[in-house]
Amino acid sequence: MGNKAREFALKAHGDQKYGTFPYSVHLDEVASIAKSYGKTAEAVAFLHDVIEDTDITAKEIEQEFGCFISRCVQILSDEPGDTRTIRKAATYKKMGNVKGDESLALLVKAADRLANMRACIREGNEKYLTIYKSEYDVFRKSAYRFDLCEEIWAELESIQHA
């Protein structure tokens, strides 16, 4: 399932960039963090930005990967809004209501944030690292679930307090 999700996501993202790198760099990093939690987590990781950043719809993801994966990707997709602050507030509110099996989406969101913060450190991107750190408390409040992915949260905490 991971290879199919990766190929689907790469085709959907086309020639989009993650900074100066092909988008595959970001997708591969998020998936590498998530894959120890299972094949479904890995597939959702590859697909996590498809609805938000491409013309692919939730229905198309559902047709290819099923309702559960589609729903997880929808949870991960930013809500609409004119500014990052508005988009993130609505998205974090949505994530705060997630329960049960769909908490897998929150694991992938933590992996995504970790990949983003690692990239900021590697590339010296203080602007986005500062943004991620300023959002951290509300992000954690909405996305953290006890015993879901403690290793990811431990590294996020260490970066937050570095």
Image: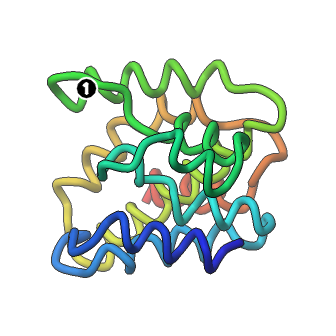
Task: Tell me the quadrant of the picture where the C terminus can be found.
Answer: bottom left
Seen from the viewer's position, the closer of residues 5 and 19 is: 5
Residue 73, horizontal then vertical, whole percent: 55, 44
What's the colour scheme? rainbow
Looking at the image, residue 122 lies above or below residue 117:
below
Looking at the image, residue 84 lies above or below residue 155:
above
User: Is 114 displayed left or right of 152 in the figure?
Assistant: left
Task: Tell me the quadrant of the picture where the N terminus can be found.
Answer: bottom right
Seen from the viewer's position, the closer of residues 15 and 28 is: 15
Q: Which residue does the numbered mark 1 point to in the structure image?
A: 85
Residue 136, horizontal then vertical, whole percent: 44, 39
| Residue depicted at x 44% and y 27% | 91
| Residue depicted at x 49% and y 34% | 139
| Residue depicted at x 15% and y 23% | 82
| Residue depicted at x 41% and y 54% | 50
SS for dot 1: helix
User: Is 101 displayed left or right of 128 in the figure?
Assistant: right
